[in-house]
Image: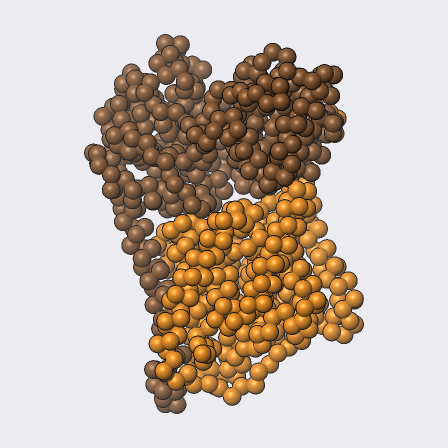
Amino acid sequence: MDLLQDPSLFRLLLVLSVGAAFAVYTRLHLVGGGSVTGGYLAILVVTGEWSTILGTALVTGLTLLVMRAVILRVLGLPRSWQFTIAVLVGAALTGILAVVVPPYISLGEPLGIAMTFGAFVVPGLVAYDVSHQGFPQTMLALACVTGITLAVCVPAFLLLQGLPPGSTDDAPFVQRIPPDLMPYAVVAVIVIGGALRFTLGLRSGGFIGALFIVEFFSVEAFLAVGAAALTTQLLMWFIERRVVMTGRQRGMIALMLGALVAWAGLYWAAALGWLPAQEANLYVLSPLLATGLMAADMGRKGSDVIKTFVGTGLAALGLAILLWVTDTYGIVVGILALLIAALGSIPGILALREPWRQAERSGKARLVELGRDTGASTPPA
Amino acid sequence: MGDILERAKGDLLTQQSLSAALATAALLVVLITWYLWSTRALKALWAIPLRVLVTGTRGKSSTVRLIHAALTAGGIPTIGKMTGTSSRELDTLGNEYRTNRVGQVSVLEVLETVHRNMKRTGPQPQAVVLECMAVSPDLIEFLSSRIVRPDVVVITNALWDHLEEEGTSLEKIAISLSLALPGAKLLVTSEHRETTRAVLSYEASLRDVTSDIVDGRALPADVLAIAPNAHPDNIAMATAVAEYAGVDARTALEGMASATSEPLPVVAASAQMQGITWTYRDIGSINDTDSLTPALEGAKAQMPPGAVVFGMLVTRWDRPLRAMQFAASVTPDDVDGLIIVGEPDVLVRYVARRSGWSNDRIVRISTWGMGQRSLYDRLADTGTRIMGERPKDIGIIAMENNHQYVADLVREKFFGSDVI
């Protein structure tokens, strides 16, 4: 039985899954791989993508192994770095799996870009949560969020089945990132997003914002997503003055609200005959996620509307350049270009040295108080 | 325009529009439910006339217990909430409850405490004492200004800990902790360092908050004798808060004498294995190197004479700077050997070697206890190498953090599962 006759049902599932993640976090203080992982898994369940679920689990395990056996042991990094590295490792391992077992994810458009993105980032998100929260807790959170989402969605889908799908537009479907370059694009956008964050303190719409804008490749798309995110942020300011929310709760509400604003905006803009909106509407989840994640980034501590706009714009520009280089000169040159882009993180890495030095100095301060030799390499503060 | 309305009208009863309606309803349900629940808890919290928020680096939980006891003794029904290593709640009758956690520590626990207290018997609270579980500056500010809105803020001290979040100098740490101050009327602190104390006073004055800087060292011996298990600074701070609430010092002190204490092991435990007497002492609740010396000396004094003593660094990957601090601070002058559990162990070993440790005196046990079975064998071998003969006594002093898989197993081996 095909439960999902209309793409809008996927959108409903996405919003409901974030709502379920909000409930699980608020009630149990548990997270299961970010806000959208439960929704991602629920979509894989209802579409019967069992091999992808298996692949996601496999890569999550491998990512966790790499994190635990190497990265967490060697690198004394802040949580934000560990998070980005976990996502990057997960994406890289998924990329390898996608090359070895093609097609790793068989869902084509209109879900393709969001689900491919999900397949690449979810292992890292889950592995990170397992690392800091614990395996049983993370699995419990995932089971709860996915279970609640399915428990609400499946009856809703059955009820809606008897209704007509709704109006559609005749806009041509555009796909500017070649499918075979999608793994490269996802890894690249994480690298660029990380460099922007750690070197310039800029957020880039939860990575997928930039990816979607490049996929769509137009200034209009960027401005439309930006306008929807800004509208969401204005609504969030209004809500935040009345409702007490932690940062994580705020992010989830912004994601839900952003998705709804984008959904409504796309509908009416498409109805008005605006071609970019009609084209964007064909991407079922990406514009909703891009808007919601940009809005969530706008409200984070240390971030704001301008920084998010600039960050997302720069990430999109960087990704577009890398994709052009790769498309034109081949994957080897593309990987070299990606490594050069990764050098953008160097100022951020250098900035980590001072806390390390200070930590060692503060440890040695005790020895100074005791009148012991502290060694020449680390003079006490 | 007519076409658009016609299209919208045609879409009214479709999967598309009803999906959107259901999604909107989901958002509203989530938001309104949370709004109603949180508002009820906040109103109940803000209805309590005296709200005290206790933050700082060391001694928060003990200070909360002392303030609770002091106010209760003064006839002010008080509820208390301790967090961190062992999360507990105190009701207005002085009963203690464990806070059961499924997931992570969250500032939302404060609201849950208030909700739970609404259902408990006993007089209505006239005061609440809450330990600040927030560590990052933005969360401290959020907890204080949006949730607690305290009348009194206690900053126990500003020491070298939580460098990742609060800053890498004592001044920065003090400024981060001061984010609890906005809206308060009184700051009580027992910070000893003059410069850090000056920062706290300055931050208080910027926000029109009166500072009350106390010093436990100034308390007479007969006062300290009333609550012999409490730290003098904590007694001084609790007395200051009680006096602010109108409770005289003598009554407050008498109340403090009956204050409960942390369910932490404060004594050493022993076990016989492989013909060796093993002695274990846990000082893992001391997370800053400022407070390490007296705790470490006290723990060493509990070890049998002639024992080979190992310091067990219980490291956490999300606290790499703390791991580096301890690795730099604990040297062969302190203990005979080093055990490293948790991560980032490679980094910790590197720093430890810079502190004078050689590899043959370092024993590493991996994350999930792989090799844990051989821990005691390996320690015995290392002890033999250090002593030149098989030791009769081996001591283990766990430090830096309380919880980690291997560290918990070792603690359980000596104490069972009754403590933290």
Q: Is residue B129 above or below residue B136?
A: above
Quadrant the C terminus of chain A occupies:
top right
The picture places residue A191, in percent across and down from the top left corner, at: 66, 59
Q: Which residue is drawn at the image coordinates 75% and 67% (left, top)?
A: A334
Pick the front one: B161 or B158: B161
The extreme front residue here reads B274
Q: Residue at x 63, y 69 (%)?
A: A104
Above or below — where is B107 with respect to A289? above
Left or right side of B207 for B293: right
Q: Residue B134 appears in which quarter of the rendering?
A: top left
Residue A136 seen by the camera: yes
Indicate the position of residue B298 as horizontal and vertical percent values. 54, 17
Chain B visual colour = brown
- Where residue A212 sits: x, y (%)? 58, 70
Q: Residue at x 41, y 20 (%)?
A: B230
> Would you identify the image quadrant in which residue B352 lies?
top right
* Chain given the colour orange: A
Residue B210 appears left or right of A226:
left
